Image: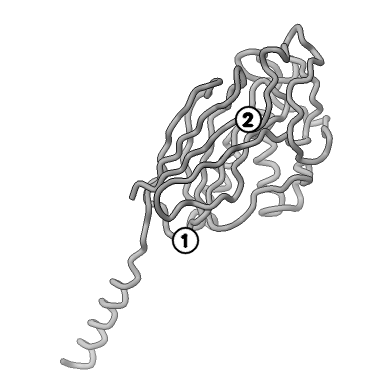
Amino acid sequence: MSAIQKMFAFLVITIACQTVVAADYRVEITNLTHKIEFTPRIVIAHVPVSFFAAGDNLNDTSSGLLDGQINNALTEIAEAGNLGPMMAILDQESIQNFVSYTIGSDLLGGGKKQTVELLNVNETLSRISLFAMLLPTNDGFIALNNAVLPQTGNVQYYLNAYDAGTETNTESCADIPGPLCGGTAQSPNDMGEGFVHIHRGIRGLNPEEINPAEYDWKNPVAIVTISRIH
């Protein structure tokens, strides 16, 4: 065998040994509340990284993960249920190799569940995150943040409701989007509490519009069951 043939054979073996291992996952999301609805959910497999932490100021779009891009995207989800900015980030060429995501379509009502699949997930993407808005709230959202994907079998995570801290909780339909209220989704001149924290629920500030007897909740608000299926 010539030197060139030996080199070619070595390259073939090397490439074969570099075959990427991929996995498929089934993600079931269950709404544990009575009447709160979840806006369309974004489910992201990714390399180990935390999207946010309690106490973060999501109004700050100049610092944080990806120089504030993630803060802005989370604000859009929490105030408007808008997944567009988050998807635009994940679709960037410089980001694509570090994430894989899918969308759970439509509103998910109280007591309902939905299953989505994450397919052909590179083994380097060992974590999972999930985000959606809570309706009717000003800036409430559910979050599974940087959780571990199972190597075999399945795992369950219980999710709390968070307040993004980017809009005052007026509980006024004029300030809340969605089928119940149909109000304004965002409030650029209202900075809210200024930090992410556990949501206090519906407190009855405008009971004629959003009755806490119907819409208040206690944590956790969701169960996410993740199963490795391949």
Whichever of callouts 2 and 1 sits on the residue coming sooner in the sequence is 1
Residue 161 appears left or right of 37: right
Q: Which residue is mark 1?
A: 124
Asked whether 137 or 188 is in front, the reply is 137
Residue 133: quadrant of the picture: top right
Q: Secondary structure under badge 2?
A: strand
In the rendered structure, find residue 57 and report the number of the disc placed on it: none
Residues at badges 2 and 1 in contact (C-beta under 8 Å)? no
Give the Cα distance between marks 2 and 1.
28 Å
Q: Position of residue 71 (x, y in %)?
A: 70, 44
Q: Position of residue 157 (x, y in %)?
A: 55, 41
Residue 14 appears left or right of 194: left
Callout 1 amino acid: Thr
Q: Which residue is mark 2?
A: 133
Q: Residues within 10 Å of mark 1 (few under 14, many from 20)?
A: some
Identify the residue at horizontal 52%, vertical 38% (top origin): 224
Count of numbered badges drawn on the protein: 2
Residue 169: quadrant of the picture: top right
Callout 2 amino acid: Met
Q: Position of residue 84 (x, y in %)?
A: 57, 36
Q: Secondary structure under badge 1?
A: loop
Asked whether 38 or 184 is in front, the reply is 38
